Amino acid sequence: MLKSIRINIQKKSLKERFLLVLGILFFLVYLVLGLFIIFMKNFPLDMSPAYRIAFGILLIAYASFRFFRIINDNNN
């Protein structure tokens, strides 16, 4: 599987590779931001802990959605 992903990335144009890297970067940004919002003790915005955890989970769910879209687009 890893070999097929490597070959598939090599077939992509420079623009497609750049968009793939950008997609992976934003996946990581949303994932880290969601974890940061959930586990940060001194959060700068005045939010109740329940809303903060819900917002963090929403960001992590969106990050996983983006990850599966990247994987599906990479297989094509």
Image (tube, rainbow, N blue to C red):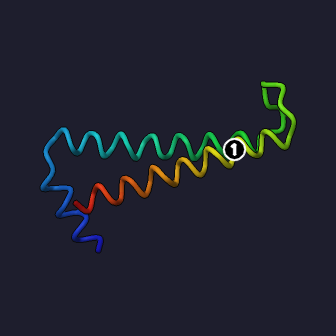
Q: Nearer the viewer, residue 10 or 62?
A: 62
State the residue at coordinates (80%, 39%).
51
Q: Position of residue 18 (x, y in %)?
A: 26, 40
Q: Quadrant location of the C terminus? A: bottom left
**Labels in figure, total:** 1
State the residue at coordinates (50%, 46%).
28
Which amino acid type is shown beneath numbered disc 1? Answer: Gly
On the image, which quarter does residue 67 sit in? Answer: bottom left
Q: Nearer the viewer, residue 57 or 24?
A: 57
Q: Position of residue 13 (x, y in %)?
A: 13, 45
Q: Is residue 71 above or below residue 21?
A: below
Q: Is residue 49 left or right of residue 22?
A: right
Mark 1 closeness class: few <14, some 14–19, many ≥20 residues within 10 Å: many
Residue most extreme to the right:
48
Residue matched to label 1 = 56
Label 1's element? helix
Q: Quadrant location of the N terminus? A: bottom left
Q: Is residue 18 above or below residue 47?
A: below
State the residue at coordinates (22%, 70%).
4
On the image, which quarter does residue 21 sit in? Answer: top left
Q: Position of residue 56 (x, y in %)?
A: 69, 44
Q: Is residue 26 left or right of residue 4?
A: right
